Structures are given as C-alpha cells and as structure tokens.
Image (cartoon, rainbow, N blue to C red):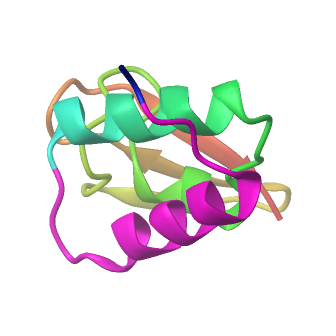
C-alpha cells in the first residue's frame, strides 16, 4: 500500500531535490509529477531544467531586452524566460 504525503512534506521534498547540484531527467520527471499531483508551483526552479528533455539546463545564454534565452546542450531547444 502506498503512503500518502501531506502538502508540506512534498514541499520539503521538492526543496531538498532542487538543492542538489546534479540530477537526472528521470528523477526530475518524478519530482515534476509529484508537484503537479499536489498542485505545487515550481516557480524559480523551472529555470534549472530544459522544458523539452528535462535535463539540467546548461549551454549558450543570450539576453535581449525582454527575454533570457538559454540553448540546451543536450537537445538544442531554446528555453526562453521573461525578465
């Protein structure tokens, strides 16, 4: 039987996960689904991973007047964030 978690426990688990320096896309997928299940927003943590392949976001950074664009090294997708 699966154990159910409270919303506070899930928030602590999310905080601990994003404090780690390295994580895999499989781990991130599980954490993202957990946050969606309990309706918890990731806020600033969204900028730490690629929207397409869910790997850690590293790569070329471009800055324009309205957006910061980071190209993923893994898949080549351009992640755009508003200022």
Q: Which of the 4 image quadrants contains residue 38?
A: top right
Residue 16 coordinates in the image, percent (x, y): 40, 74
Residue 43 can be seen in this image: no
In the rendered image, residue 18 lying in the magenta stretch gets the answer yes
Q: Residue at x 67, y 52 (%)?
A: 42
Q: Residue at x 41, y 68 (%)?
A: 18
Query: Is 12 rendered above or below residue 67?
Result: below
Q: Is residue 64 toward the left or the right of residue 19 in the image?
A: right
Q: Residue at x 17, y 42 (%)?
A: 73
Q: Residue at x 26, y 51 (%)?
A: 56
Residue 79 coordinates in the image, percent (x, y): 52, 38
Q: Quadrant of the N terminus?
A: top left
Residue 79 can be seen in this image: yes
How many numbered dots are placed on residues in this image?
A: 0
> Which residues, given as a range, are shown in magenta?
3-23
Residue 70 coordinates in the image, percent (x, y): 44, 50
Q: Is residue 43 toward the left or the right of residue 18 in the image?
A: right
Q: Is residue 43 toward the left or the right of residue 49 in the image?
A: right
Assign the magenta stretch its main secondary structure.
helix
Query: Is 71 rendered above or below residue 56?
Result: above
Give whichever of 4, 8 is nearer the camera.
4
Q: Quadrant of the C terminus?
A: bottom right
Give whichever of 8, 57 is nearer the camera.
8
Residue 34 coordinates in the image, percent (x, y): 53, 34
In the rendered image, residue 32 lying in the magenta stretch gets the answer no
């Amino acid at each position: 039987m699966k154990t159910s978690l409270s919303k506070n426990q899930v928030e602590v688990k999310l905080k601990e996960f994003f404090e780690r320096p390295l994580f895999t896309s499989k781990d991130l997928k599980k954490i993202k689904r957990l946050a969606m299940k309990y309706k918890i927003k990731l806020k600033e943590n969204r900028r730490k991973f690629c929207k397409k392949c869910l790997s850690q976001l590293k790569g070329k950074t471009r800055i324009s007047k309205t957006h910061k664009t980071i190209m993923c090294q893994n898949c080549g997708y351009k992640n755009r964030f508003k200022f």
